[in-house]
Amino acid sequence: MVNSDNAATQVGFWETVQRAGFWRRVLALFIDIIVVSLPLQILLIVLFAQTNGAVQGSFGINSTSCVSIGELPTGLEPAPPPGFNSIVECQTSLLGFDTSHSLRVAEVNQDGSVTTSIYRDYTLGADGRPNRAFTTDWIAILLLFAYLIFMDSRLGRTLGKRALNIRTIDIDAQASTGIPLRKAFLRQLAMLIGMIPMIIIASVMFFKYLAGADLTSLTNRSLFSLMIFGGLIEAVWLLWIVMSVANKQDPIYDRLAGTAVVRT
């Protein structure tokens, strides 16, 4: 049986609050990305300079400049794609301080209106020489997810949400501060459901690459079609979320987790 007092309390609660809109959520996330990434980027600037580019990353708010060059640097491993016709060198920086230095060697082919590219990326040191740098982008992503989960679990709001006067609540306990850790984790995980096909495709390509597959086999037409299919699923998933939030409805990941984001 439904507890009538509890039901009445819930109805009364939803009559006094508003769901957070699209731009409040987006701006809150933007602030949170800066909160997490900026200290890491400052540390990365120091590490990049001190290790001659042995530690690098291209996450966060940055600028990237690329230039085509005419000659390959010596010492590239593994070998570039056979028949390459494009060499592009890129530098990523924050306020003029380098955080990443890379090289892309590609074979670009034009067939009517369709352009295909087989490429291999390399990391370069601060001196422009090839190296096997430790990239930190994945660490920044993991820390961002950990921060979002921890703050929602403990306080129900991140620093970005606090700045935009919104918070995450547990549908089953609206008055509680924070949400259960399980729900906070499920909420972040559910956001990625639409990316599962692309994650699977990328994982297959990565393990084939580690097993020694040549680049041509990783860019065949069937795999390209699968990537388009995965990209469409991801786009539809994102559009569904955006439309739900824009209409001030709980997006699918909030419904799966039993949470909501409301204005305070």
Image (cartoon, grey):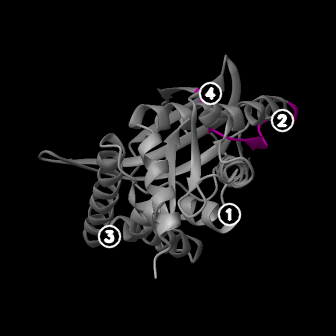
Mark with earlier residue (2, 4): 2
Above or below residue 113? Residue 203 is below
Amino acid at pointer 4:
Ala
List the residue tagged with mark 1: 180
Horizontal side of 134 relative to 219 (left or right) equals: right
- Magenta highlight on residue 87: no
Secondary structure category for the residue under label 3 = helix
List the residue tagged with mark 2: 47
List the residue tagged with mark 3: 223
Q: Please say if the residues under marks 1 and 3 sit with CB atoms less than 8 Å apart.
A: no
Residue bounds of the magenta highlight: 50-62
Image x and y of residue 43, in percent: 82, 33
Amino acid at pointer 3:
Leu
Question: How far apart are labels 3 and 2 at the CA level?
Answer: 38 Å
Choose mark 1 or mark 3, whichever is in front: 1
- Front in this rendered view, residue 97 or 148: 148
Question: How far apart are labels 1 and 3 at the CA level?
Answer: 40 Å
Identity of the residue drawn at 42% across and 32% down:
23
